[in-house]
Amino acid sequence: MTKEPILSAKDVEIQFSLRGRKLTAIRRCSLDLYEGETLAIVGESGSGKSVFTKSFLGMLDSNGSITHGSIMYDGKDLAKYKKEKDWRTIRGKKISMVMQDPMTSLNPLKKVGKQIQESIELNQGIKGAEAKKMALEMLEKVGIPFPEKRYNQYPHEFSGGMRQRVVIAIAAACHPDILICDEPTTALDVTIQAQILNLIRDLQKELKMTVIYITHDLGVVANVADRVAVMYAGQIVEYGTVNEIFYDAWHPYTWALLSSLPQLGVKGEPLPTIEGTPPNLFNKIQGDAFAPRNKKALAIDFEEEPPFFEITPTHKAKTWYLDPRAPKIEQPEAIKRLRASMEGRG
Amino acid sequence: MQEKEKLIELKDLQITFGTGKKKFVAVDHVNFDIYKGETFALVGESGSGKTTIGRAITRINPVSAGEILFKGRRISGKISKELDLEVIKKCQMIFQDPQASLNERAKVDYIISEGLINHHLYKDEKDRYNKVQNALREVGLLPEFASRFPHEFSGGQRQRIGIARALIMEPEFVVADEPISALDVSIRAQVLNLLNELKKTKGLTYLFIAHDLSVVRFISDRIAVIHKGRIVELAEAEELFLHPLHPYTKALLSAVPIPDPEREKNKELIVYDPSIHDYSVDQPVWEEILPGHFVYGNQKELEGYRREIEK
């Protein structure tokens, strides 16, 4: 690829100290983010998808820190940022975040308009009437009717979907380069979810943002993403364009995730499941972290960590299955069915 | 279709909350039957009244008009003590959030056997113990888990405990209220498989309450779509997906994200606007438009739906 990444994380390791023990939440994880794209990070809870992206904004809990690697953005290494003062030049201005639950991410005692205005005043140094004008514009941009009236209302006067629109307005108020959406629609109804996804897409075009979605809903991923990164136990195990991940995935964990979806199952037959639990991140993991849960794991999976194998210039997977020495392994039925139905439609 | 045994019948059901000025009609004119051995899904947005119906069947919410029949006997309103006990035993519920629905201070042993204890449904301590062990085994947990507390389990395991608690009463009918919505993607399949397996081995009938139409397609035989307390469409699962008629059903179907990028990119989002219905003169009815396919609409709309079917 010739395009320069806008943000580039390399070999990032994040550790938390818990009761005197070290938990490695992110195990040497790399990620390139390209300008204007929508990248979705998927994985089960505890896979580290939130922690990883929070480290781009210096929002890790106080017992956690980046212990290795670099996060290059705009010529600076964010992994070296320690002081709150440094982070303030990035957070909200350049990189911004939308949280999952609009009930808890707004201040219930402050007028909605003021909360948007606050973000503008703090980050752009614009004060008073002018900031208010911008806040009103922002309310209109996120599709809230009667912005003048809504400006003076409190969060409890808004429905869940409208509240999430306000949260998006706050995050996008300073026209950030990168918008991180952490499960932005999980707490919402499906019909509202579709509207919010469209809103984020429209804003992205208008404000020329790069968007990272963190989600476990593969339906949402199929809807929004240009590229997908699949995360398991603190590592990205497969990258690819959205079509490569859905129609031609190669990592056994991606297979398992897709196969277990009821939407892709065959009625009357049991769904393929992922047995067992993710590994304990307090311990050192040997080999492929997913091997203990993979019924078709190879002997080497338990001994040596697989490197990334390139399938196409945009598609990489971290599995020994792709080693030329590995026995031939077939993709599971669900993926074949998905591909067949895509090709059938032409 | 041959005659199937009706397990649950809802007749013109209305459920209201509050009285006087504050009266709120949560569910109105709901009519449907649930046949023995089927999985009947009720789908709608939050606040549409789907959970309220489930709770009315298990006698948690009182019914303000209409009636509910269980095996042909009325179970809504005032009923005899014996029948009440039977409903408690035969109609059980599985809840959405396994973090909130289990008593944090009780051991699994007590949580599972609480129903037995309340109604003295066991011979002696040994009988109770055996029943708990069996229930745990049936949901794929180890019998020794009985002596642990809920916080020691993962989300999927907790939901299994919730299912074991329902099973120990030997129910015939189970209301599953969004049983997988709060679970992680990787364990949803396990719980769905378990529910399907129990349906076969125990001959259970489910009322499956959900907001996600795409999940419901996989597990249910028939689907009813509810909007603002009214059922707007009811059909067999495949039929509903192939020929949705009511505009609200179409809107819901278009909003559900499908894990298939090419299809998602070409899909058009339909937004439902309730003001398109003009019910001022022409009153809407609940009509069986095709065998087994019901839709709610007035004569003019039904005419339009019929033309749509012919196409």
Image (spheres, coloured by chain):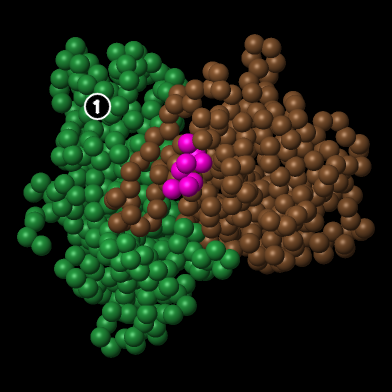
In the picture shown, does residue A240 fall above or below B275? below
Q: Is residue B203 left or right of residue A270?
A: right
* Front-most of residues B127 and A64: B127
Dominant SS of magenta comes to: helix
Residue pointed to by mark 1: A141
Q: Is residue A73 left or right of residue B116?
A: left
Q: Can residue A320 be seen at all in this image of the molecule?
A: yes
Chain letter tied to brown: B
Chain appearing in green on the rendered image:
A
Residue at (80% x, 44% y) in the render: B70
Choose between B20 and B284: the one closer to the eye: B284
Rendered residue at 62%/42% (across/down): B288
- Which quadrant, please, contains the C terminus of chain A? bottom left
Mark 1 belongs to which amino acid?
Answer: Lys
The mark tally for this picture is: 1
Residue B305 falls inside the magenta stretch: yes
Q: Is residue B129 left or right of residue B92?
A: right
The image position of residue B157, as x and y in percent, is: 60, 58
Determine which quarter of the picture holds residue A3. bottom left
- Output the chain of dot 1: A
Can residue B99 be seen here? The reply is: no
* Residue A231 included in the magenta stretch of the image: no
Q: Position of residue B192 (x, y in %)?
A: 58, 59
The answer to whether B54 is drawn above or below residue A133 in the figure is below
**In the rendering, at what x and y percent does residue B282 appear?**
56, 22
Q: Residue at x 30, y 56 (%)?
A: B262
> Residue A234, how many percent across, how many down?
35, 61
Q: Residue A329 sits in which quadrant?
A: bottom left
Q: Element type at marker 1?
A: helix
State the extent of the magenta-drawn residues as a range.
B304-311
- Quarter of the image where one finds residue B276: top left
Residue positioned 48% across, 47% down in the render: B310
